[in-house]
Amino acid sequence: MDKGVTADAAAAVRQARFGTLPERIRFEDMVEGADIDPDSKGRSTYNPEASWNHFSCVAADLAL
């Protein structure tokens, strides 16, 4: 390692190469609320009794 380079010089090189970090995004800006579609009338497309057929299983594929 080059002992002639100081921490301040290394920090200056890093700053020149990479710049600064992007600004933080507030949690409120990451979350979006949406109203329920009135045509759905509270129905969900998720069916817990039929959810087993959405997973890949080697034993099921081989009918074991």
Image: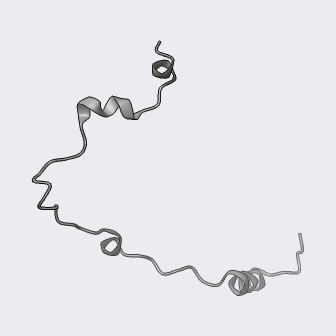
Determine whether 27 is above or below 55 in the image.
below
11 or 50: nearer the eye?
A: 50
Determine whether 25 is above or below 64 in the image.
below
Determine whether 43 is above or below 34 in the image.
above
1 or 45: nearer the eye?
A: 45
53 or 33: nearer the eye?
A: 53
Q: Quadrant of residue 27?
A: bottom left
Residue 23 left/right relative to 39:
right
In the rendered image, the quadrant that contains the N terminus is: bottom right
Q: Quadrant of residue 29?
A: bottom left
Image coordinates of residue 17 in percent, x first then y, are 73, 83
Image coordinates of residue 24 in percent, x first then y, are 45, 77
Residue 34 left/right relative to 18:
left
At 68% from the left and 84% from the top, the residue drawn is 15
Q: Quadrant of residue 20?
A: bottom right
Image coordinates of residue 56 in percent, x first then y, are 47, 31
Image coordinates of residue 10 in percent, x first then y, are 76, 80
